């Protein structure tokens, strides 16, 4: 499988089989996050893998959508603002670094035959309390991982993404409104 084929195969799954995910596979997914690049190699992230029944129920309670019930494993990806690179203009790079790590993880999971879904629309304070996170450590993404019980059209990007001409600019930015 080429990289583009793998990237196209990844999608947001919101329905998982009633089948636990092997810890070894979860570890491989977190290994893909661990080796991700980060600004100044600061690696400002922590991966909290939730697999046990009660803890899963508490994490699901941080998110309003019932589909998360089907997830048998959720990795809470936390950004450590205390540890992230700060540029001279003050911009802290935690968000960018964590996004790269999560992208590595979603692609690694896809490669292992697993499915994932980024979740950012969750109750952050509830999650902080549940995991007893220290100041400066922010839960940024809930990443359910499991065996998909749904499927998507592998050619969906043709309809669901902006056309390449709209987003690629050669040599200079050229703004041209596109009709959809
Ligand atoms: C930063 C980010 C946050 C997201 N948050 C949520 C979320 O809270 N709930 C959800 O169901 N999907 C969420 N998604 C999934 C997107 O809706 C999805 O990636 C997008 O519609 C493209 O679909 P695809 O992932 O199947 O290609 C999020 C995706 C990203 C990258």
Image (spheres, grey):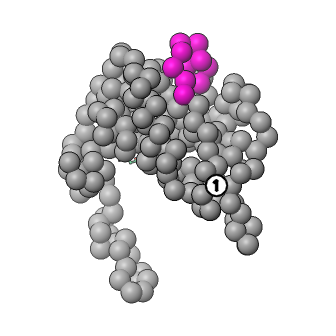
Q: Residue at x 39, y 17 (%)?
A: 20
The magenta stretch is 49-60
- Placement of the C terminus among the 4 image quadrants: bottom left
> Residue 79, percent across and down?
64, 45
Judged by its main secondary structure, the magenta piece is helix
Whether residue 96 is visible, yes or no, is no
Q: Quadrant of ligand 1?
A: top left
> Residue 39, percent across and down?
60, 61
Relative to 88, 46 lies left or right: left
Q: Nearer the viewer, residue 14 or 75?
A: 75
Is residue 98 found inside the magenta-colored segment of the image? no
Q: Judging from the image, what secondary structure is the residue with disc 1 in? A: loop
Q: Residue at x 54, y 28 (%)?
A: 49
Quarter assignment of residue 178? bottom left
Mark 1 highlights which residue?
Answer: 42
Quarter assignment of residue 94? bottom right
Q: Residue at x 59, y 24 (%)?
A: 59
Is residue 54 found inside the magenta-colored segment of the image? yes
């Amino acid at each position: 499988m080429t990289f583009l084929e793998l990237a196209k195969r990844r999608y947001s799954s919101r329905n998982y089989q009633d089948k636990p995910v092997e810890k070894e596979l979860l570890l491989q997914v977190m290994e893909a996050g661990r080796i991700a690049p980060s600004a100044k190699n600061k690696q400002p992230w922590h991966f909290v893998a939730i697999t046990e029944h009660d803890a899963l129920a508490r994490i699901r309670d941080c998110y309003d959508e019932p589909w998360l019930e089907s997830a048998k494993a959720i990795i809470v990806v936390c950004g450590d603002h205390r540890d992230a690179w700060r540029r001279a203009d003050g911009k802290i790079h935690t968000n960018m670094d964590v996004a790269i790590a999560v992208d590595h993880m979603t692609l690694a999971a896809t490669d292992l035959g697993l499915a994932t879904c980024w979740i950012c629309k969750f109750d952050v304070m509830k999650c902080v309390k549940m995991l007893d996170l220290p100041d400066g450590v922010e839960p940024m993404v809930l990443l359910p991982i499991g065996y998909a019980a749904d499927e998507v059209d592998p050619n969906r990007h043709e309809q669901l993404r902006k056309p390449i001409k709209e987003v690629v600019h050669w040599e200079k930015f050229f703004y041209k409104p596109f009709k959809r």
